Image: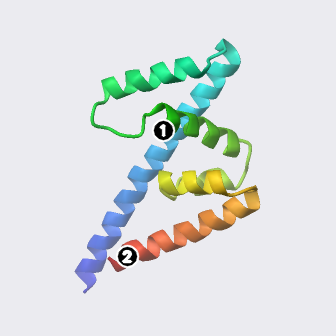
Amino acid sequence: MEIKQRIRSAQYEALKVVNREMINLYWDIGQMIFTRQQEAGWGQSVVEQLAKDLQAEFPGISGFSARNIWRMRDFYLTYHSKEILPPMVAEIGWTHNIVILEKCKDDLEREFYIRITRKLWFQHYLKN
């Protein structure tokens, strides 16, 4: 039915906006961590403390473990100097991004899996 399809379409668009903002936030955190490491010599203990502070400030919100903060840094470092990939990574979920980041060996492979994930995610969402 046309109304159901319109509702699904609106839900999908809202999900894309939220996802894009979360990916942008994680990108910014990764960039800040990298910059602080370069300028102020931040190390592992600072990131561990940051994770504790964020978890205390935002209880019940997942995603701010020390491990995930390090992933944000790796995410930023992997993609910041690329031209094509940064806009694409904002179109798939964080978990998908991490799997692709950690499993793929080069940018061409990453681009392939990002494109496939984006296509399958869209198809899956509109079917359900």
For the N terminus, the quadrant is bottom left
**Farthest top residue in view:** 40
Helix, strand or loop status at disc 1: helix
Give the amino acid at mark 1: Leu
**Farthest bottom residue in view:** 1
Left or right: residue 118 compared with residue 85: left
Residues packed near mark 1 inside 10 Å, few (<14), some (14 to 19) or many (20 plus) = few
Q: At which x and y percent is residue 100?
A: 61, 57
Give the amino acid at mark 2: Leu
**Residue bearing mark 2:** 126
Residue at the (29%, 75%) spot, across then down? 6
Residue at the (63%, 66%) spot, across then down? 113
Q: At which x and y percent is residue 43?
A: 62, 19
**Residue bearing mark 1:** 25
Left or right: residue 63 compared with residue 6: right
Residue at the (44%, 45%) spot, across then down? 21
